[in-house]
C-alpha cells in the first residue's frame, strides 16, 4: 500500500503544480484583458453632442437630398448645427463640408465653411452655400471655383 501512495504522490504533485500554473496564467490573462478594456475606454473621445451621427433629408416633389454628419447639436427647436464630415447626397449631386446649420421645418441648410459640390458634369468649390426652396435652389458664396466637364 505504501508503494501505491508513493507512486501516486509524484503524479498528484505534478497534477497539482500544473493546476496551480494554469490558475496563475488564467489570472494574468484576465488582468491583461481588463487592462486592454480600460485603455480602449479611455481612448474613446466623448464629446458633448446632442445627436451622434445624425441623418436627415430634404424632401420635395421630384427628389430627396440625404444629409449625414458625425455630430449634431440643437441650436433651437428648428435649427441643428451639423459638424464634421457633413454630406448632402441626392441622385444628381453631393456636397461636402464641415459645418452646416440645418432647419428641419423650412428644410433649408446653410454653411459658411469651405464646401465642395460634385455632380456628373461639374464641380464647385466655394466658401459656403445656402440650400432653400426644399432643395430646388442652391446658392454658393464667397470665392468659388467652377469646373465644367
Image: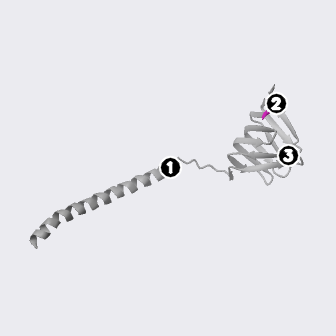
Residue 43 location (% of width, % of height): 52, 47
Give the mark count: 3
Question: How crowded is the residue under tag 3: few (<14 C-alpha within 10 Å), some, or many (20+)?
Answer: some
Question: Which residues are the magenta region?
Answer: 118-123
- Tell which circle, 3 or 1, labels the residue nearer the N-terminal end: 1
- Tell which circle, 2 or 1, labels the residue nearer the N-terminal end: 1
Q: Is residue 14 above or below residue 46?
A: below
Residue 106 location (% of width, % of height): 86, 49
**Quadrant the N terminus occupies:** bottom left
> Is residue 39 in the magenta section?
no
Question: How crowded is the residue under tag 2: few (<14 C-alpha within 10 Å), some, or many (20+)?
Answer: few
Main SS type for the magenta part? strand
Label 1's element?
helix
Label 3's element?
loop
Residue at 70 percent of width and 43 percent of height: 83
Q: Does residue 140 appear to the left or right of 52 in the view shown?
A: right
Q: Is residue 136 in sight in this rendering?
A: yes
Residue 148 location (% of width, % of height): 82, 26
Label 3 or label 1, whichever lies nearer to me, is: 3
Reading the image, the residue beneath label 1 is 40
**Quadrant the C terminus occupies:** top right
Which mark, by number, is residue 52? none
Q: Does residue 54 appear to the left or right of 77 in the view shown?
A: left
Which mark, by number, is residue 121? 2
Which mark, by number, is residue 63? 3
Alpha-carbon span between mark 3 and mark 1: 42 Å
Residue at 75 percent of width and 33 percent of height: 116
In front here: 51 or 53? 53
Residue 32 location (% of width, % of height): 40, 52
Amino acid at each position: 500500500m505504501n508503494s501505491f501512495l508513493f507512486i501516486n504522490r509524484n503524479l498528484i504533485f505534478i497534477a497539482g503544480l500544473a493546476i496551480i500554473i494554469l490558475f496563475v496564467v488564467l489570472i494574468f490573462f484576465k488582468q491583461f484583458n481588463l487592462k486592454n478594456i480600460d485603455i480602449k475606454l479611455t481612448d474613446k473621445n466623448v464629446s458633448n453632442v446632442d445627436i451622434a451621427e445624425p441623418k436627415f433629408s430634404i424632401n420635395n416633389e421630384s427628389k430627396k437630398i440625404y444629409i449625414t454628419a458625425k455630430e449634431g447639436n440643437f441650436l433651437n427647436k428648428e435649427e441643428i448645427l451639423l459638424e464634421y464630415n457633413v454630406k448632402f447626397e441626392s441622385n444628381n449631386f453631393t456636397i461636402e463640408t464641415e459645418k452646416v446649420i440645418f432647419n428641419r421645418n423650412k428644410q433649408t441648410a446653410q454653411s459658411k465653411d469651405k464646401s465642395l459640390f460634385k455632380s456628373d458634369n461639374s464641380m464647385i468649390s466655394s466658401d459656403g452655400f445656402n440650400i432653400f426652396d426644399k432643395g430646388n435652389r442652391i446658392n454658393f458664396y464667397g470665392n468659388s471655383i467652377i469646373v465644367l466637364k
